[in-house]
Amino acid sequence: MGSFDDSSKHDFNLEVVLSCFQRCLRTDKRVGLEDYLHAYHELCRFFKLTGRLFGFVAKDIESKMKAIEYHMHSEHGHHYDTVDSMVEYEVDKGTARHKGSHPSGCRMMLRLHWALEFILAFMRQLLDEDEQAKTSKVAWDIYSKTLYHHHPWITSKLAAVAVFALPSKKHLIDVMCKHDYSNVMVLLEQVLDAGQPVYDAVERIMQESNLSHIA
């Protein structure tokens, strides 16, 4: 699995995530799918930048994004402008629960939605901890309450090994983030303020369409 690589400064950029989330929720309260995925591309970079430690997480997230992007770039792509229009289209077509070689956008969106719950909860808890707090404990506590319930046994075991290699809060931020520690603290709060309404909107869409528990 490897250990946390702190041999060089990385450039995970919370400003990119923030701007995407701010654009994501439109004035009509519909959730822009392209901006949502752009936010996820940067979030995915965070996991990639840890090296082998969270490589399995990055690969899983990327596969979900690529599956949705396949539909966005297909002849039916105009139905994939927003999460709302994607759900409406796939529910009407009867493909919302489709698996296969090209699984439905709804199925993949739900997986990203579950992951966003973990990411936002982790950021929120990180804000409240002192700078020497063990992010390994924070990450496992949040994972146990969120993604653990959706992951198969082997993924949970990999996650358990990975999170316990994480360093202190300040060390994690100093190594992983483009901005300095004090700016990251400000950006985390802004990302939460912008990201939570996006999460809530997607949760509402999934609940109203009875898609919250696609197996």
Image (spheres, grey):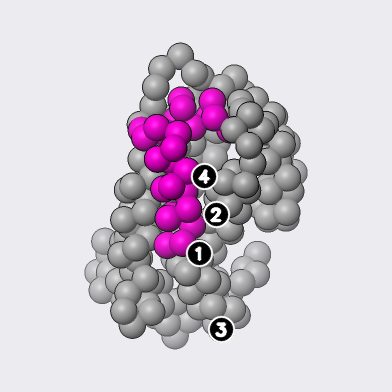
Mark 1 touches mark 3? (CB < 8 Å): no
Q: Is residue 152 above or below residue 93?
A: above
**Front position among marks 3 and 4:** 3
Q: In this picture, which residue range is highlighted in magenta?
A: 169-194
Q: Does the magenta stretch include residue 188?
A: yes
**Front position among marks 1 and 4:** 1
Give the residue at mark 2.
120
Q: Is residue 147 left or right of residue 153?
A: left
What percent of the width, then of the height, locates residue 31? 38, 72
Mark 1 touches mark 4? (CB < 8 Å): no
Which amino acid type is marked by label 1?
Gln
Give the residue at mark 4.
60
User: How far is disc 2 from disc 3 in space, using C-alphas?
Assistant: 22 Å
Q: Residue at x 55, y 54 (%)?
A: 120
Give the residue at mark 1.
196
User: How far is disc 3 from disc 4 in space, using C-alphas?
Assistant: 26 Å
Q: In this view, does 135 lie above or below 25?
A: above
